[in-house]
Image: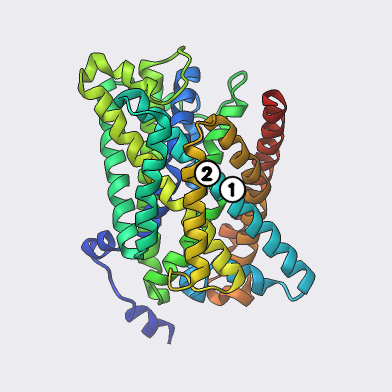
Amino acid sequence: MLEKKMMSKPKYTLKDKIKAIGPGAMITASFIGPGTVTTATRAGAGYGYALLWTVIFSIVATILLQEMSARLGIITQNGLGEAIVKQFDNPTLKKLSILLVGGSITLGCASYISGDLSGTALGLSTMIGIETRMMGPLMGLIVFFLVYKESPKLLEKVLTALVAVMAIVFVTTMFVAKPGVGEILSGCIPRIPDKSLIYIIAMIGTTVVPYNFFIHAASAGQNWSSPDELELSKWDTNVSITVGGIITASILITSATLMRGMEVKPAADMAIQLEPLLGSWAKMFMSIGLFAAGLSSAIASPLGASYTLAGLLGWKYDNSDKRFRTVNMTIVIIGAIVSGLGLNPLTIILIAQALNGIVLPVVAIYLVYITSSQRQLGEYKNTTMQKWVGVFVASITVILGTTSLIDAIKSFEQIF
């Protein structure tokens, strides 16, 4: 019987796998935002190539957790929210889980989109001269239109295209900078330079994003329905997120090569260093890269909130459900308004960081536990190796989340 089953398993061509790229690209587009660009730029400028290993660790951890999310969506044909609700028979635990996860992620998404629009507006206004308060709401209008139209396939295509643009821009600038191969390889060896812990936390925290688990489970379930298609999902996840890692690494490497020892404020500062190499093209290159990063991440934020609440509260996963559409539009409107107030993007990002510190460990533990459950996934549950590696990564997120929360609280004390 098993032999017959193996013989009937479809063989996918490279063309089939390339066509399958979509849900994974959405995740990459989500975590490559202005925060990632700025953090990687500062890490490279401050510590050279020494923190390159954090990109590798983050990408491996993200691939592992996002593969679990996608597998859950395909096998159960439900999202992570439904799985969390289903896991608890106790009504009190069920309600607490819905309140903690749903509330934290929704508030976090509102903070993330506000920071994405504000940070991107700040960078672009530096280079193209349009006032920040106008640029943020203008980008908000673009996001509003795309999310309002909400066609999963359209959004996947838009986000995949934005990832491709970022890859071209940032990888090209890395090659133009001509970094040393030996130094790059040395940066792959884990070490913690003096006073670098905050950057290590930031590099991991901007890549492993809790609402992406909900987006991926739901979108993978919408794209595929058969266990035989897990191969396509894995390809999509591995390739897309690896590309995201290459983009992040290229930003850090370029900064380490051209800006080492400099104090970097917005990521737009990198354009100044590229001018000797790219001339008048430098500003345009960075403008395009920042625009793609900000827009892609801002699109994902409202989807993160609506997918999470839809799963937890039993809504439909599209705009035909008024509640789903209302959450989408509300998050975008909040982001557009906040970005137009001229607030310090750092303060907004700190709020998102604090909320991320609370919910990331919780959601990561839920995810590993549920995908290791015979009750939920049957024969497609995590293998012993996947489970223990997942436990290790979830443990790291606990340390990361706790440290991130403490750091955010200290930063708030300094600001206020």
- Residue closest to the eye, 115 or 199: 115
Residue drawn where x is 69% and y is 36% of the image: 403
Q: Which amino acid lies under the numbered mark 2 shown in the image of this protein?
A: Tyr
Spot the residue most to the bottom.
1
Q: Are marks 2 and 1 in contact (CB under 8 Å)?
A: yes
Residue drawn where x is 41% and y is 51% of the image: 299
Residue drawn where x is 38% and y is 24% of the image: 268
Residue 190 placement: quadrant: top right
Above or below: residue 34 compared with residue 18: above
- Residue closest to the eye, 56 or 215: 215
Residue 112 numbered tag: 2
* x then y, percent, for residue 29: 39, 48
Above or below: residue 301 compared with residue 116: below
Residue 1 placement: quadrant: bottom left
Q: Which residue is mark 1?
A: 108
Residue drawn where x is 58% and y is 74% of the image: 314
Left or right: residue 290 compared with residue 306:
left
Task: State the quadrant of the C terminus.
Answer: top right
Element type at mark 1: helix
Above or below: residue 3 compared with residue 345: below
